[in-house]
Amino acid sequence: MIDIVGAGAFGTGLAVALARSGRPVRLWARDGIEAMRETRMNRRRLPDIVLPDALDLTDILDDLDSDILLLAIPTQKIGGFLEGYTPRAKYLVSCAKGIDLTTGLGPASLIAARYPQKAVAQLTGPSFAADIARGLPTALTLAAADEATVAHLQTALSTQSLRLYGSTDVIGAEMGGALKNVIAIAAGAVIGRGLGESARAALMARGFAEMRRIARSYGAREETLAGLSGLGDLILTCTSEKSRNLRFGLGLAKGGPWTEQGTVEGVATAQGLAARGDLDTPLVDAVAQLSTGKVDFDEIQEALLARPLIME
């Protein structure tokens, strides 16, 4: 049995894909389980996907007793969730992207700090929940501190359409997933402001350089950022309006409020990193300022274009 905590879009998508591949899967949600049982759909998060009959649904935490537990809840909620729940699973897999504002840790590192005796991994990479649920080909990074854990979880969680590449650079995988959200907000703002595709391409390239610089300061290996969890995810979220962070950036540029359901992790990540103040992070700082309304788009654009000319 594989247990999944969190019936958001990504948790539901993973549950559907794994159950459809023949694995026994149990999905936990705090609320809405009865409606999901009756309709065999998660109408709020993946309204076009039918839940396989083999997928078990529960709202009782004590039901979760498998060896593998996937935590598909927002990064900012992981700490509070774990305060009230002690997992029985040997393997804990974070499916979140972001940096915890309280501790400054990535989601897998946050879980590992709370449960050092557990085998903790990070699942991340370029993926939309609906694509995973529909069985479209998707490749992700599965990172854990030791190769044995990576190998075990790769086998347990890969399917015919979901391919997991292994890594032992947990911090690199965490940082790639967190930082690309920030750059995606900036990309959305560029497009929403009508600055054009050339500007978006330049922003993605300079954003990637900034991602590598920040990740290195946390102890990540730069080559990890060049893989699925960094560059791959950056390309996806900066070019598709399926990306919640990109849509948020579009709305910021047009001056509209955020009215959609779901967490925009890039906002918290940008604000947490900008508060550090010890790195040259112009794009992260710009997103933090723009998302809090401290400066308007024109001021940010002028400041970025006025920066000193440098060697690439």
Image (cartoon, rainbow, N blue to C red):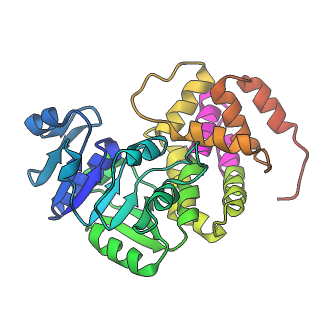
Residue situated furthest bottom in the rendering:
148
Q: Is residue 193 visible?
A: no
Q: Which of 173 and 236 lies nearest the eye of the viewer?
A: 173
Q: Is residue 203 magenta?
A: yes
Q: Is residue 210 magenta?
A: no
Q: Residue at x 35, y 72 (%)?
A: 154
Q: Residue at x 56, y 59 (%)?
A: 230
Q: Which of 285 and 26 lies nearest the eye of the viewer?
A: 26
Q: Which of 80 and 48 lies nearest the eye of the viewer?
A: 80
Q: Residue at x 24, y 57 (%)?
A: 3
Quadrant containing the N terminus in the rendered view: bottom left
Q: Which SS type dominates the magenta stretch?
A: helix
Q: Is residue 185 left or right of residue 73?
A: right
**Residue 97 point in image, percent of width and height:** 49, 50
Quadrant containing the C terminus in the rendered view: bottom right
Q: Which of 165 and 68 lies nearest the eye of the viewer?
A: 68
Q: Is residue 49 visible?
A: yes
**Residue 235 point in image, percent of width and height:** 54, 52
Q: Is residue 47 left or right of residue 288?
A: left
Q: Residue at x 47, y 62 (%)?
A: 112
Residue situated furthest top in the rendering:
256
Q: Is residue 303 left or right of residue 79?
A: right
Q: Is residue 281 left or right of residue 115?
A: right
**Residue 98 point in image, percent of width and height:** 53, 48
Q: Which residues are magenta?
A: 181-204
